[in-house]
Amino acid sequence: MNVSRRGFFKVCAAGMTGSSLATMGFAPSAALAEVRQYKLAHATETRSICPYCSVSCGTLVYSMGDKSKNAKARIFHIEGDPDNPVNRGSLCPKGAGLLDMVHSPQRLTHPEVREPGSNEWKRISWDEAFDRIAGHLKADRDANFIERNEAGLTVNRWNTTGFLASSAASNEPGYLMHKVMRGLGAVAFDTQARI
């Protein structure tokens, strides 16, 4: 085989170009990437909101678990929601660490109460927690509700209990929270968005 100097350089240049393209990720196997199974392909995608601050960034929460076979779903990936108008898919460092918060061993997943005089927290059911909260609110309102002021004007005021609403709630729950608390006479009403 007789190869000229010019032919030798052409073969070397073609080989170097091919190996450089393969090194940069343009290998033929990359063209078949759509055949691979991605980790999110069979996951359940749930839209949620980041709980950390009042910005209310949208998140996509991915979980695995077959509900039909009674397997508990486990969250394995959380990312920003690109369709959310607040954050458009980006998350701050706290939002980017949501997965660590979800799987933290210190995270409370059930209500607890510390009785007066005790130094121990005890686990209670959700129904018991709601009953206790409602009982405390009713007792405080019954004891401290002001129907009329010193001038005899009707004020229907409840000054001893405040309410902090979630800024992550949409308009409808926010409106209902406001109406319920104002209907009970609560004056101290604020939202997390002001913090």
Image (spheres, helix red, strand yellow):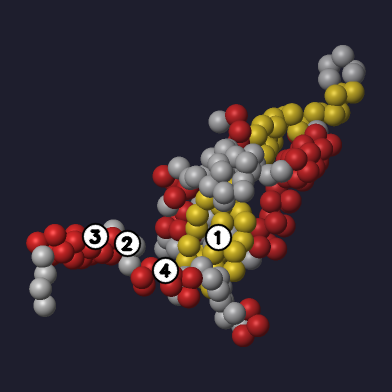
- Residue type at the position of mark 1: Val
Which numbered dot is residue 25? 2
Give the vertical position of 92 relative to 2 (above or below): above
Query: Picture coordinates of residue 191 (x, y %)?
Result: 65, 34
* Label 2 – label 1 distance at C-alpha: 30 Å
Which numbered dot is residue 17? 3
* Label 2 – label 3 distance at C-alpha: 13 Å
Please give left or right for residue 6 compared with residue 73 in the image. left
- Residue type at the position of mark 4: Ala
Asked whether the residues under the numbered discs 1 and 3 touch, taking CB atoms below 8 Å apart as contact, a structural biologist would say no
Number of residue marks: 4
> Which SS class for mark 2?
loop
Which residue is under mark 1?
A: 61
Which residue is under mark 4?
A: 31
Query: Picture coordinates of residue 88 (x, y %)?
Result: 56, 43
Asked whether the residues under the numbered discs 3 and 4 touch, taking CB atoms below 8 Å apart as contact, a structural biologist would say no
* Label 1 – label 3 distance at C-alpha: 42 Å
The numbered mark, 4 or 2, whose residue comes first in the sequence reads 2
Question: Would you call the spot at circle 3 few (<14 residues within 10 Å), some (14-19), or many (20 or more)?
Answer: few
Q: Nearer the viewer, mark 4 or mark 1?
A: 4
